[in-house]
Amino acid sequence: MSNRIGDKTGITSSLISIAAIFCDTGKQSAALTILGAAGSALKSSGTVLEKIDQILNEETVKKLQEKIKEEDYLKYYEAGERMTLDEAFQLVICN
């Protein structure tokens, strides 16, 4: 796994792609939690996404904002921010 070798950009890019799929397949809460974890990893590592990943992230966030009530949105996103990347991947596996 990329996490073991420190490829934070690759990991977060993968998580954002998975979150987009989850968003489009009815798993909005998991998608939002995963985005929270990806966002936290980006902030803590100081890495920047490729432009295409930034666009996908923004589009997914917009869709989720339309589908999830604001208080639930914050709850799921903040739960993701508290996760490690390993925990985020466990969430992916469980869904």
Image (tube, rainbow, N blue to C red):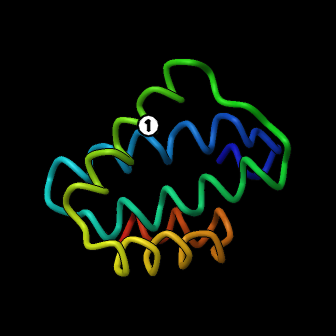
Left or right: where 86 falls relative to 19: right
Left or right: where 65 falls relative to 7: left
Q: Nearer the viewer, residue 48 or 84?
A: 48
Q: Where 50 sits versus 78, above or below?
A: above
Left or right: where 5 falls relative to 40: right
Which element type, helix, strand or loop, lies under badge 1?
helix
Q: Position of residue 57 (x, y in %)?
A: 46, 38
In this view, which residue lies farthest toward the left? 26
Left or right: where 31 falls relative to 48: left
Counting labels gives 1
Q: Position of residue 24 (x, y in %)?
A: 18, 47
Q: Quadrant of residue 46?
A: top right
Q: Quadrant of residue 47?
A: top right
Residue at x-position 41% and y-position 39%: 17
Residue at x-position 25% and y-position 52%: 23
Q: Amino acid type of disc 1?
A: Glu
Q: Nearer the viewer, residue 70 or 17?
A: 70
Q: Nearer the viewer, residue 91 or 73?
A: 73
Q: Which residue is mark 1?
A: 58
Q: Position of residue 66 (x, y in %)?
A: 22, 55
Q: Position of residue 90 (x, y in %)?
A: 49, 70
Q: Nearer the viewer, residue 28 or 7?
A: 28
Residue at x-position 45% and y-position 81%: 75
Q: Quadrant of the C terminus?
A: bottom left
